[in-house]
Amino acid sequence: MRVLHFFKTYWPDTFGGVERTIHAIAKGTADYGIQSDVLSLSRAPEQNTREFDGHMAHKAKLDFEFASTGFSREVFGKFRELSERADIVHYHFPWPVMDVVHLTSRLKKPTIVTYHSDVVKQRLLLPLYRPIMHRFLASIDSIVATSPNYVATSDVLQHYKAKTTVIPLGLDERDYPRAPEDVKARWRARYPKPFFLFVGVLRYYKGVHILLEAAKKTELDILLVGEGPMEASLKAYAKEHNLGNVHFLGALSDADKSALLELSTGFVFPSHLRSEAFGLSLVEAAMFGKPMISCEIGTGTSFVNTHGTTGLVVKPNDPSALAAAITHIADNGEERARYGDRARAAYLEKFTAADLAARYAKLYSDLSVR
């Protein structure tokens, strides 16, 4: 069986949460005899079309971007060419251009959509896009949400509950080798006091500005791993308010990130908007057996981190609540250890890449015989 994945971005151009999910599905389903291709946009399509972990990452020329949406004339022909070779086409939502490509292609193959998120940021453009979106989703054979929480709180998915299933996102521990002792020793020497860790792209919905407000209310170190469009303004805020306990580490190697995950007291994830549909970084923290702090935003973050079981869930956009949760976990060792053990157990039960791949392989098989 051959599956074509279609999304606006993919490795090596970017490798965020959606891209990592596509990679996990493509890599994992290969064990079931499924060959995957991925089509995305790139400013350097010839250079960035290459093989990746047993599947091909194909590129169409990115012409321009508007409202976080990449546009391409070439992608229509590329999609037609690759979809003709595929047995199933697997879309990753949202990306409005993808909807138009699908609707104009007159595709006759079985189709699936992984519904990663509602359209949240582009509220002004949503009325124009909504009719196209519903035509697209209505034409798809199967929709996959990443958590029951998101199905329950998405107005869009309520229209398609009859054909929507839930397959949680998952990660493969083999992609996260434990850090060598010398790497851990280096970080331990640099940050000898207990610290809380954030890992993620510094985007508007990640709530890092709220975390900086919370940092004023605690002396605990807070380490931020990641880069992104909000980086300059966040650093300026930290400097203006003399936040000596906040440390911007930028992008790090896998070994360094694994070291910090192992050494951290807990993991803090302050995302405050529904654009954060799942929180794959929380799965990383659970994999490493870390207590988690997140916000209740009606999405998969509260599916990964269950309040009072794997950590604490607080009100969004509330620096005082965030600071209190950080302090509470730091001050209560037995509770912290219990949360960490349960987080690790939750990872093994619900969030492994092997389970993700098995469930998608079955769904592909079911679609192919309809």
Image (spheres, rainbow, N blue to C red):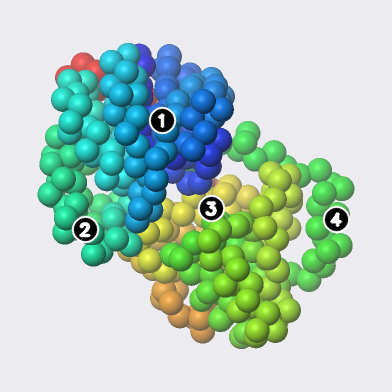
Image quadrant containing the N terminus: top left
User: What residue would you read off at disc 3?
Assistant: 281
Marks 1 and 4, Cα distance to the nearest angstrom?
42 Å
Question: In this orientation, does residue 42 appear?
Answer: yes
Crowdedness near tag 4: few (<14), some (14–19) or many (≥20) residues, C-alpha within 10 Å = few
Image quadrant containing the C terminus: top left
Direction from residue 45 to residue 116 in the image, left or right: left
User: What residue would you read off at disc 2?
Assistant: 126
Image coordinates of residue 239 in percent, x first then y, are 68, 79
With respect to residue 42, does 111 lie above or below? above
User: What residue would you read off at disc 4?
Assistant: 186
Q: Nearer the viewer, mark 1 or mark 2?
A: 1
Marks 1 and 3, Cα distance to the nearest angstrom?
29 Å
With respect to residue 238, does 3 lie above or below? above
User: What residue would you read off at disc 1?
Assistant: 60
Image coordinates of residue 204 in percent, x first then y, are 46, 66
